[in-house]
Amino acid sequence: EVQLVESGGGLVQPGGSLRLSCAASGFTFSSYAMNWVRQAPGKGLQWVGYISARSTTIYDADSVKGRFTISRDNAKNSLYLQMNSLRDEDTAVYYCAREPNRSGGSGFDFWGLGTLVTVSS
Amino acid sequence: SYELTQPPSVSVSPGQTASITCSGDKLGNQYACWYQQKPGQSPVVVISQDNKRPSGIPERFSGSNSGNTATLTINGTQAMDEADYYCQAWDSSTVVFGGGTKLTVL
């Protein structure tokens, strides 16, 4: 069974840092691209970033560029999101999501349950 | 930046057909996907590659994408289909989501 479990969320002050993790199981993690998607309270989905299966390609949204870094460790079946210089508007539930085939339009076929990040003083 | 536009809300009677549109410049030139999200739950893909239903998604869900508009159609809408629906596409090196449509079944 495919499972994605996010962790690392919590309360952080503006300007602070946080590192989110996404533990994958039930599939060959190293064969899949991954994404981070967030959702502010009561709002829609917002894409944060993408990392290819072997980390050769990384994209991130303009809203987090220069502040957030996506990485992965295929040996540990884990995806990460390092978040620095956090702002109030980064408050959201952060999901990791698997993407089988970007060019083939597969979409994000499995999502974790999410972890809540709250940026507040 | 690229934008996908959805109606904020759509209402449908049980058993009727619901259509949710997603508009974007030349959207038909790329693949569109659709996600269903119920309160307190993670999104679930209901349509990928414009019109493919993933395993486990009921046949009443279908999709199309042409020109500037992708459409999610739910035939014989059921109460359990009440949810928020989001379209999604890649634009070059960016993933774009539509603003979401709240489907009400009443």
Image (cartoon, rainbow, N blue to C red):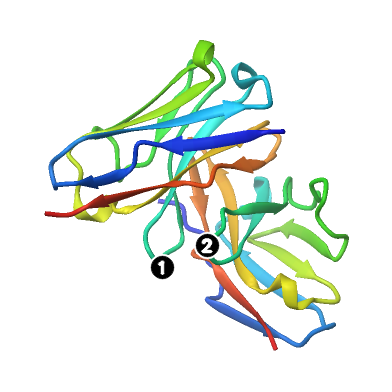
Q: Which dot, 2 or 1, sits closer to the camera?
A: 2
| Chain designation of label 2 | B
Q: Which mark is residue A31?
A: none
Q: Is residue B62 above or below residue A94?
A: below
Quarter-of-image position of residue A120: bottom left
Distance from label 2 to label 1 (Cα)? 11 Å
At which x and y percent is residue A30? 60, 17
Q: Is residue A113 above or below residue A77?
A: below
At which x and y percent is residue B54? 79, 47
Q: Closest to the observer: B2 or A1?
A: A1
Q: Is residue B70 visible?
A: yes
For the C terminus of chain B, the image quarter is bottom right
- The residue at 85%/66% (across/down) is B60
Q: As shown in the figure, which amino acid type bears the numbered disc 1?
A: Gly
| SS category of the residue bearing label 2 | loop
Quarter-of-image position of residue B57: bottom right
- The residue at 60%/58% (across/down) is B87
In the image: residue B43, left or right of residue B65:
left
Query: Do the residues bearing badges 2 and 1 touch, measured as CB atoms within 8 Å?
Result: no
- The residue at 79%/76% (across/down) is B78
Q: Which residue is mark 2?
A: B40
At which x and y percent is residue B70? 68, 61
At which x and y percent is residue B52? 80, 49
Same-subunit check for callouts 2 and 1:
no
Q: Closest to the observer: A16 or A107?
A: A16
Q: Closest to the observer: B57 or A121?
A: A121
| SS category of the residue bearing label 1 | loop
Q: Which residue is mark 1?
A: A42
| Chain designation of label 1 | A
